[in-house]
Image (spheres, grey):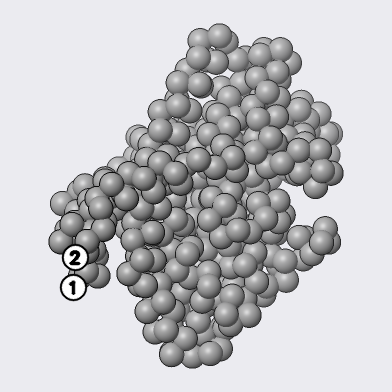
Amino acid sequence: MTIALLFGTLFICLLIGVPIAIALGVSALTAIYFGTTLPLSIITQKAFTSLDSFPLLAIPFFMLAGILMGKGGVSKRLLAFASALVGWMTGGLGMVTIVACMFFAAISGSGPATVAAIGGFMIPAMVARKYDGGFASAVAAAAGSIGVIIPPSIPFVLYGVIGGVSVGSMFLAGIIPGIIIGTGLLLTAYIISKKRGYKPEPGEASSFKFKDVLTTFWDAKWALLIPVIILGGIYGGIFSPTEAAVVAVVYAIIIGKFVYKELSWQGLYESFRQAIVINSTTMIIIGLSVSFAYFMTIEQIPGEISDYLTALSSNPLVILLAINLLLLVVGMFIDTISALVVLTPILLPIVVSVGVDPVHFGVILVANLAIGFVTPPLGVNLFVASSVGGVRFEKIAFAVIPFLFSMIVCLLIITFIPALSLWLPGLYE
């Protein structure tokens, strides 16, 4: 009865368009009031105490660092460097978008932020060069998903806090999978561009020029140093992931204001204001998601799900495949942060019991939910790309299908070859 109340209320709330954070809180409140004798105050208590966490401070600071980088001239320099690397190829502008998103992912830690920063430049540029608007927007939306896989990653921070897994290990674990997904998207974009005849315009570079790569690399050196500073500082024992996020903010202000000189005082104010607004929403989601997850734990729902999955098979590959299918569906309807908070306490004990490494599973979990960024009806990246590119959502949703298949293939490779995620963290153990 209680389980039916919990998930029935959640489903109804989502069906009528209630924001996910409120839906989680209302469903937990309804189940507690009608199905238990627990005090209703437990909702607010768990929501508040869950946010009293030092590691969670990394989330707003990484958000702020990404916004500051976007306003401080970093995006333009990363685009120029990416253009020198792959802009001469067939479908060059699409390739540039993907490579630039991979670079920006190592700065922002956020999928939608990556789409906004890179897509805002590249989608209009591609449309102006006669690229199909749906294709241009789909490239930016799909590539933006890499923002939560290549470190620093906000979902990796959250998973590490909830699952008791080293955030630093998660950051290292995401590097190779992020590159694999990026490579898959590049191949997909190249095949589509070859078929449609998207070639460099007359007057543009039509071959690789090492001199241009060196020039643009030197111009972008301060931006490219950011992931080196963050990961180097963490693994050099200089600072924690949370302190690394603060360092990233200070560094972003310095290079944007005093090196590139493109971050105005007004831009600085807008960056802080935007980060506050986004973080407020994020913290509400986290708090109420924890309340929902806590109630499920009290009702032993995770145990029942665990028993069901382990009854299917004791083979870890079969269980991981079943979990992948579940997560792909969940990602279509629930945002990444809510899904992480609710599902990590349920699924992590299951996979650990069959011998799956928690770090490897964290990558699988986040990669699945990253695909949710480009799968309707939620598809946050699709909405962002539609907004910045002025292209209808339906057109982008259809154009993103080939990229979606490519990401799923990469997900399966990451799932069934654990060494891709565990090799780098293993070097530092």
**Rendering coords of residue 410 (x, y %):** 58, 67
Residue found at x 81% / y 38%: 238
Q: Secondary structure at mark 1?
A: loop
Residue type beneath disc 1? Met
**Residue 7 in picture, x, y percent from top left:** 24, 65
Is residue 45 shown left or right of residue 215? left
Residue at 46 percent of width and 57 percent of height: 340
Is 197 situated above or below 211? Answer: below
Q: Quadrant of the C terminus?
A: bottom right
Drawn side of residue 299 relative to residue 309, left or right: left
Comes first in the chain, label 1 or label 2: 1
On the image, which quarter does residue 221 sit in? top right
Type of amino acid under label 2: Gly
Residue 207 lies, in percent from the top left, at 74, 43
Most distant residue in the top direction:
265
Image point (47%, 42%), residue name: 51
Give the quadrant of the N terminus.
bottom left
Taking depth in this image into account, of 142 and 346 the one nearest to the observer is: 346
**120 or 325: nearer the viewer:** 325
Find out whether the residues at labels 1 and 2 contact each other: C-beta distance under 8 Å: yes
Q: Nearer the viewer, residue 276 or 259?
A: 276
Cα distance in 3D space between marks 1 and 2: 7 Å
Alpha-carbon neighbours of circle 2 within 10 Å: few (<14), some, or many (≥20)? some
Task: Determine whether, in the image, residue 361 is placed left or right of residue 387.
Answer: right
Residue 35 is tagged as 2
Tell me the SS state at disc 2: helix
The residue beneath circle 1 is 1
Q: 375 above or below 265?
A: below
In the rendered structure, the answer to whether residue 40 lies left or right of residue 182 reads left
